[in-house]
Amino acid sequence: MPETIAFSTNNRRVPLSGAVNFRDLGGYPTTDHNRVRKGLVFRSDHLSRLTINDQQLLQTLRFKTVCDLRTVLEQRLAPDLLPEDDSIQLLSLPVQVDGFDPATVMDRLRADDEAWLSVDFFIELYRRYLDDFGPVWGTVLGLVASSHNLPLVFHCTGGKDRTGICAALLLKALGVQEENILLDHDYSNDCNAERLQPIYAKFAAMGITAEKAAPYLQAPREPLVALLAHLKKTYGTIENYLLSKAGLDRTTLTALRRRLLQ
């Protein structure tokens, strides 16, 4: 039976004051009895609130690359705060489908536009992220395949949807079983819990219940489960997806696995 890992979030989180969902993707076992190396690839919420101490910690950990998956407007409104010495390269890799920009969500809700607050909406959104943004996911995985870019962190705003898709594709490419991929997805709910309370309060002030807000503010499993099913049905295997949609080649996939597995 495949090994299922139940790490606590404390085993994975990097202790930053300004980012609560910054955590290591290493440690997961694979179906061929390898394990993902720790300390090389991380996922996170946005980095626009990093303190000087946070920046110094990232330098101490020798981070080399940050991949920002947020929309252009999200990045402009809340730019990442990284060390001023340019020791960490910042790459802008916007992921945005037509008609939905997280930067404008509050304005939409104030205008009583809330019909999109449903699990079904996010199931379709995840599918579009997968089908339409293969080159972005391929860029991130291609960077991870080279030691020159590591340690690397990729992030969006909450570190759960776009970041969750990127993490799932990376872990699946490495041979991590889907139950552990879903467990990793679940950890965002624990990491983001405290910071979400004021946001739930803003939603409540607009008459939006916590239950209705949950598909957007939480990290429900259903969209990711549907994405993995869509991946299998449409592309067959993760390798086929990465080769046909993400622009990777077999040499890069081999380098990725050699770099990240032990």
Image (cartoon, helix red, strand yellow):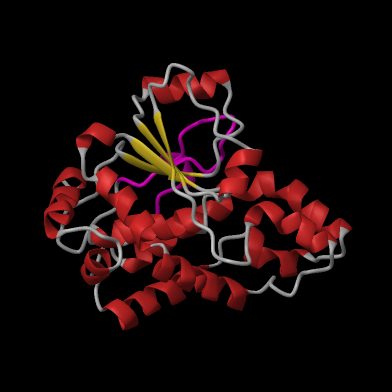
Viewer-closest of 174 and 182: 174
When asked about the image quadrant of residue 19, the answer is top right
Point 66% across, 51% down: residue: 103
Q: Quadrant of residue 226?
A: bottom left
Could you tell me residue 142's position as x and y percent?
26, 49
Front-lying residue, 56 or 1: 56
Q: Over which residues does the magenta segment extend? A: 6-26
Residue situated furthest top in the rendering = 85
Q: Could you tell me how many numbered marks the image carries?
A: 0
- Identify whether 233 is placed above or below 173: below
- What's the residue at 38%, 73% (across, down)? 228
Horizontal side of 259 relative to 116 (left or right) equals left
Left or right: residue 232 compared with residue 58: left
Q: Is residue 201 left or right of residue 220?
A: right
Q: Using the image as rendered, state which of residue 182 and residue 42 is in the foreground.
A: 42
- Picture coordinates of residue 113, whole percent (x, y): 78, 69
Q: Residue at x 32, y 50 (%)?
A: 139
When the figure is inspected, residue 61 is found, relative to residue 247, above or below; the finding is above
Return the residue found at the far bottom: 233
Quarter of the picture containing the N terminus is bottom left
Residue 27 position, x and y percent, is: 29, 47
For the question of whether residue 18 can be seen, the reply is: yes
What secondary structure is the stretch in magenta mostly built from? loop
- Does the image show residue 5? no
Q: Is residue 27 magenta?
A: no
